[in-house]
Amino acid sequence: MKSPRGLGVWLLLLLLLTGCAASAVEQTAATEQSSAETAIAQLRATSTVARARMQTTLDYAGSRVTEAAEAQEFLRFNLISLGTESAWLSTAIGQLGEVGEQATATAQPAAIGTDAAPSAPSSFAVIVTPPTPQRSGPRLENVLMASGVDSRDCAIDNNPRFTPASSQIYVVAQAYNVLAGATISSVWRRQDSEVAKFSFQPRNNLDGDCIWFFIDQSDAEFTVGAWSVEVTVDDILPAPSLAFQIVPG
C-alpha cells in the first residue's frame, strides 16, 4: 500500500504534465492565429495597392480618351477654318472610313511557313478636292483670335489658345464690301453647342476696316476644350469658322 505522501507526489506530477500540455496547445494556437492575422493584413494591403493602381490606370485612360476627343474636335474646326466645308469634311471622313474597311477586308495574311507577302488592296487612296470658298460680295479677311484690340479696332496679337482664367476672348477681322446697315453677327460654340451670339450694324460702309466681337466669363464659362466662332454678314458666312482652344492654365 502506497503512502499518502507518494500519492500526492504522483497527483502533483500529473497536474504539472497536464498544465504543460495545455500551455503548449495554447501557444501553438496563438502562433497560428498571429500568422493568420499577418497573412490577412498582407493580403488586404496587397489588394488595396492593386485597386489603387487599377483606379489610377482607369483614370489615366479616361483622361487620354477625353484629350483625344478634344484634339479631334480642334482638328475638325481647324480644317473648317482653312476653308473646308463641314458637309464635305463629313463626306470625306466617311469615304476614308469605307476605304479603310475595304483595305482591311482585302489584305490577307501570308500562310504560315511560306514567304508569300499579304496582298495589297487594289485601291487605297481617295482624293477629294474641297470646294473653293466664294469671294464675291461682302468678305472678311485676316480673321483671327486675340486677347484684345488697339485704338484702330484691330487685333493686338494672334492667339488661338486661352485658359479658364482669361478675362476676354476676341475674334477680329477686316471687313470688305460691307454696306452700312448690314447685320454682322458672331456665333460662339463649345464643340457643336452654341453658347453665345452677338450682332451689330455699322453706320458706314466697311472696306478694310477692322471689326471685332468678344466674350467673357459672364457670357459663357471658359471650360477647357475645343471652341469655334463664326462671323456672318446678313446671315452669309463670308469667312470660314475659326477654331480656338481653352487649355488648362
Image (cartoon, rainbow, N blue to C red):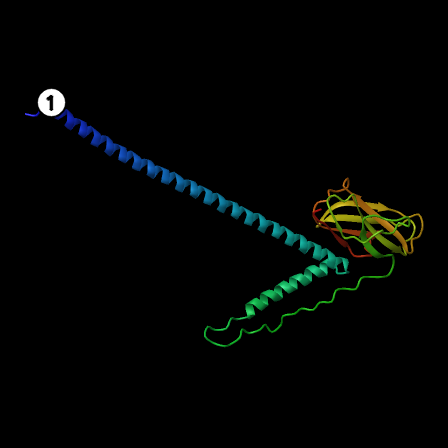
Residue 224 placement, left or right of 40? right
Residue 106 placement, left or right of 85? left
Residue 148 placement (x, y as % from top left): 83, 48
103 above or below 182?
Answer: below
Q: Nearer the viewer, residue 178 or 234?
A: 178
238 above or below 100?
Answer: above
Residue 218: image quadrant is: top right
Residue 235 placement (x, y as % from top left): 82, 51
Q: Nearer the viewer, residue 72 or 61?
A: 61
Residue 110 placement (x, y as % from top left): 50, 73
Q: Residue furthest right?
A: 204
Q: Residue furthest bottom?
A: 115
Task: Please give the name of the residue rendered at 79% of the width and 57% of the height, measured from the top-left corner.
Answer: 240
Residue 47 placement, left or right of 176? left
Q: Residue furthest left?
A: 1
Q: Nearer the viewer, residue 36 or 140?
A: 36
Q: Kindly identify which residue carries mark 1.
A: 4
For mark 1, give the secondary structure. helix
Q: Amino acid at mark 1?
A: Pro
Residue 28 placement (x, y as % from top left): 30, 37
For mark 1, does the 10 Å Cα neighbourhood hold few (<14), some (14 to 19), or many (20 or more) residues? few
Residue 96: image quadrant is: bottom right
Residue 32 placement, left or right of 150? left
Which quadrant is the N terminus positioned in? top left
Give the tally of numbered discs: 1
